[in-house]
Amino acid sequence: MTAVTAHAGTTAEPGGADGSAAPASAAVPYPVTDLADVPALGGLYVKGVAGSVTKRPGRGVVLPPVTYRVADVATTGGAAQLAAYQRVVGEPSSDVLPAGFLHVLAFPLATAVMVRPDFPLGLLGMVHLRNVVRVPRPVRLGERLEIRAWAENARPHRRGVQVDMIAEVLAGGELAYRGVSTYLAKGFRVDDAGAGHQERVPAPWAQPLPTARWRLGKGIGPRYAAVSGDRNPIHMSVLGARALGFPRAIAHGMYTAARALAEVGPARRGDAYEWSVEFFQPVLLPGSVDVAIRHPAPGDAGYVFDGWRTGRPSRHFSGTVTPL
């Protein structure tokens, strides 16, 4: 399935067709392992759950020094999936792949890194804390892509260890998407070398005036799973959620983030933008979420968004969308 290539992490990709320099992020920090195809999430979850049994909390977390890459991913045949994704999250019909869809394309590769035998943290019970995404140029249906992913920056958290999973998408040799997904592995510990890291402390939050209300039925989990491939049991049914400690199924965090991005809309975010989201309390299904999307300050071109449980000051997520 895989072939190992001796790519040095400091080797830059060629410049663009106009002779401009390639983005600095064209370099990768670790040697590259090429995969023939983007792996299916279902098999990765099975492997990750089985492997979690052997990954016990301890000190000295060392991340695998490897970059997974699929060098040639065709998007020509993805029109039906893109259209279905757009309907589910509320994106307008377009041949431009929004950042949430690019996350969907790259997520299996990052998951493949996390289920490696030498990845020290168990996939089972991993908590998704936040995403920070940069889209420096649009990606259109029909472009051929390079996708790559690796893990970095294991550091302390008051409840365990947090780690960043990096996923990048290149189109025509140019960086078109870079996503940093931060996860928490509860109960694990890093050694003293990580003691200098400062844990992120959320800013104080006051409930804003809502601009929308989402009424989410229990079917939104399976619907988003159908377009994303993410069939984690906690999103699919009450029984699957209860097996992992939730009273009911919960919405995919990336569904709520992608829907907020869609409500900002392509015209307001532009072709190039940054998108961040931080997750707090999960959204139980069925449920109702109040959402506020607004400018952070008068005259500011960017947007901030928040989602919280209707009728209660229980925040689910907060984020930003900033045109570049």
Image: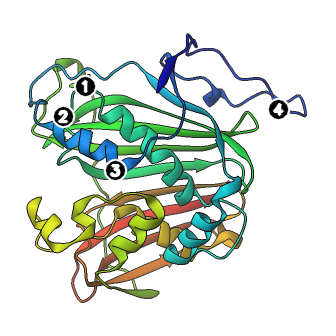
Spatial CA span between label 3 and label 4: 36 Å
Residue 302 seen: no
Q: Earlier in the sequence, mark 3 or mark 4?
A: 4
Q: Earlier in the sequence, mark 1 or mark 3?
A: 3
Spatial CA span between label 4 and label 1: 38 Å
The residue carrying pointer 2 sits among few (fewer than 14), some (14 to 19) or many (20 or more) residues within 10 Å by Cα, namely: many
Q: Which residue is mark 2?
A: 51
Number of marks present in the image shown: 4
* Residue 192 tag number: none
Type of amino acid at the residue the image marks with label 1: Pro
Type of amino acid at the residue the image marks with label 4: Gly
Spatial CA span between label 1 and label 3: 17 Å
Q: Earlier in the sequence, mark 4 or mark 2?
A: 4
Spatial CA span between label 4 and label 2: 42 Å
Q: Earlier in the sequence, mark 3 or mark 2?
A: 3
Q: Can you name the residue that lies furthest to the front here?
A: 1
| Residue 97 in which image quadrant | bottom right
Q: Which residue is mark 4?
A: 16
Q: Which structural element holds mark 4?
A: loop
Asked if marks 3 and 2 touch (Cβ < 8 Å), the reply is: no
Type of amino acid at the residue the image marks with label 3: Gly
Q: Which structural element holds mark 3?
A: helix
Q: Which residue is mark 3?
A: 42
Q: What residue do we see at 59% from left, 74% from top? A: 91
Q: Which residue is mark 1?
A: 117
The residue carrying pointer 1 sits among few (fewer than 14), some (14 to 19) or many (20 or more) residues within 10 Å by Cα, namely: some
Nearest-to-viewer mark from 4 and 2: 2
Residue 297 to residue 217: above or below: above
